[in-house]
Amino acid sequence: MFLFFQQGNNPSRAILFLDIDGVMITTGESETQHQPKFSATPVQNLKRLLAAIPDLEVVITSAWRLTAWKHLLLLWQQAGLPEQRLGGRTPHLGPDGGRGAEISQWLEKAQGHIRQYAVLDDMNFGLTPPIPADHVFICHPHDGLTEKMAQRLEAFLR
């Protein structure tokens, strides 16, 4: 069972806003799959990042949060990712919104309870503005979350 944190109830923590396609499901591996699953290297790197930063929670920004949430939760479990570190998902603001605006709204509701945050995506489409550029980390969709990117995120989120 997944336990999602309630905005405003937890002490100050770090947040990783996470996209799925191109970050956890890489084009290098998913092109041959009929049923997408998380790629091994990004999973390993996310596990290391979560181990290195004990107060880090992951918030999903991907379209998966709207169209395939239950399947995403299943993939999270199958990958052996810690369920208690999944902090939920950003709101959907409709066609006039955008990922950056959705993250901003989520941050507003959690105001005072976030010590640091980063956004990990495979493209900067609608993120900056409103998200400051130094909080946005873009990976290549073929590779997803690499060890080098995880190290950069760890240094930023500590």
Image: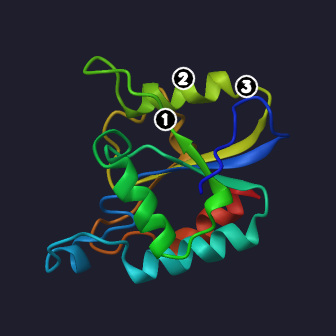
Residue at the spot 48% in from the left edge and 75% down from the top edge = 79
Label 2: few (<14), some (14–19) or many (≥20) C-alpha neighbours in 10 Å = some
Location of residue 93 (image quadrant):
top left
Location of residue 84 (image quadrant):
bottom right
Residue at the spot 37% in from the left edge and 72% down from the top edge = 38
The residue labelled by disc 1 is: 90
Q: Secondary structure at mark 1?
A: loop
Q: Nearer the viewer, mark 3 or mark 1?
A: 1
Q: Which disc is residue 111 wearing?
A: 3
Whether residue 67 is visible here, answered yes or no, is: yes
Q: Earlier in the sequence, mark 3 or mark 1?
A: 1
Badge 1 amino acid: Thr
Location of residue 41 (image quadrant):
bottom left
Residue 103 higher or lower than 143, as above or below: above
Distance in Å between CA atoms under marks 2 and 1: 8 Å
Q: Secondary structure at mark 2?
A: helix
Badge 2 amino acid: Gln
Distance in Å between CA atoms under marks 2 and 3: 10 Å
Q: Nearer the viewer, mark 2 or mark 1?
A: 1
